């Protein structure tokens, strides 16, 4: 007789092992990287404060020097003045006739900026919309403008001012400054206008918007950080212009700018406190303009970093 086959009992299945949840990315990051990130924060703060101090030191020196005598400026340059000479400002204002000079600088700079934007915005719009051989050639022509040093155009500019009977006038300065500012202004505005989404342009065109409405209602609002950047940069350039203002506009009290009037405070016995006070007065309009538009300037500087 054959022995009956033994019945095999089913082997119990092993209980499924529970997998641990995935560790977050921060936990998987090496410890050295985490320590580097923690130490980078205080280091960046210290470097930022050092940079701010480096920028504030000249402004502090300029401000305290405007209230000192010559002896205090040279012996204790960074100390507070023993006697606050507020009359240095009135002396500088009266001696250099800074009131009229500041008004001339403000008028010339304002008109020149309006003309610069009025010429640069349509040109940048056309170059941003077109991608042809002609547009690239025009863009290259504007780029060549950076290769011409300003003093190289001094003699031709003087001859042009004489031929047009505008020598020693503010009007020629108002026309000349925009011409010198167009290369940089057009190239910067073109780059900003190229960031306008094509879908938005096509949508506005389907609604019947022509080139003028596209420029005013679409391109300029989106490129406004670039417009503000160009305005600030050219305002600084126009306000601080000295060589052409001295040569073309002249030193007449009725037409001279603030930068031309300021050196009249220099003599064989210069009162450096008065000279520094005059410098502070000429810097105030630019500082106020920059403070009012600093937020737009920061947006312009970071616009490329957050795109796409």
Image (cartoon, rainbow, N blue to C red):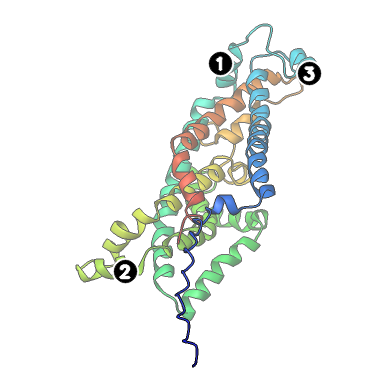
Q: Which mark is residue 74?
A: 3
Q: Secondary structure at mark 1?
A: helix
Q: Residue furthest left?
A: 207
Q: Which residue is mark 2?
A: 199
Residue 171 visible somewhere in the drawing: no
Q: Position of residue 117 (x, y in %)?
A: 42, 53
Could you say which is closer to the camera, residue 236 or residue 201? 201
| Residue 80 located left or right of residue 184 | right
Q: CA distance from mark 3 to mark 1?
A: 22 Å
**Placement of 38 over or under 267, stated as above or below:** below
- CA distance for labels 2 and 3: 63 Å
> Mark 1 or mark 3, which is nearer the start of the sequence?
3
Q: Residue furthest bottom?
A: 1
Tell which circle, 1 or 2, labels the residue nearer the N-terminal end: 1
Location of mark 1 (residue): 90
Point out residue 293 in the picture as x, y percentages from the top left corner. Answer: 44, 39
Horizontal relation, residue 71 to residue 102: left or right: right
């Amino acid at each position: 007789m054959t022995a009956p086959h033994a019945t095999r009992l089913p082997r119990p299945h092993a209980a499924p092992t529970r997998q641990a949840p995935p560790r977050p990315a921060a936990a998987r990051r090496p410890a050295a990287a985490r320590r580097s990130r923690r130490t980078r924060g205080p280091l960046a703060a210290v470097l930022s404060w050092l940079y701010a101090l480096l920028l504030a030191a000249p402004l502090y020196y300029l401000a305290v020097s405007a209230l000192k005598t010559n002896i205090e400026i040279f012996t204790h340059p960074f100390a507070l003045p023993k006697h606050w000479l507020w009359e240095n400002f009135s002396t500088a204002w009266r001696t250099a006739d800074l009131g009229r000079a500041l008004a001339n600088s403000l008028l010339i700079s304002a008109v020149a900026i309006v003309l610069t934007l009025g010429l640069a915005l349509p040109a940048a719009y056309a170059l941003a919309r077109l991608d042809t051989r002609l547009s690239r050639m025009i863009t290259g022509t504007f780029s060549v403008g950076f290769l011409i040093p300003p003093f190289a155009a001094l003699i031709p500019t003087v001859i042009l001012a004489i031929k047009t009977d505008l020598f020693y006038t503010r009007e020629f300065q108002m026309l000349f400054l925009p011409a010198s500012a167009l290369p940089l202004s057009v190239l910067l505005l073109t780059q900003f206008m190229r960031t306008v989404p094509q879908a938005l342009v096509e949508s506005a065109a389907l609604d019947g918007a022509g080139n003028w409405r596209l420029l005013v209602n679409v391109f300029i609002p989106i490129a406004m950080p670039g417009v503000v950047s160009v305005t600030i940069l050219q305002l600084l350039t126009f306000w601080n212009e000295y060589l052409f203002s001295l040569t073309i506009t002249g030193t007449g009290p009725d037409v001279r700018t603030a930068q031309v009037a300021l050196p009249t405070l220099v003599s064989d016995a210069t009162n450096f406190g008065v000279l520094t006070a005059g410098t502070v007065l000429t810097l105030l309009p630019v500082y106020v303009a920059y403070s009012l538009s600093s937020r737009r300037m920061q947006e312009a500087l970071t616009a490329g970093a957050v795109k796409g």
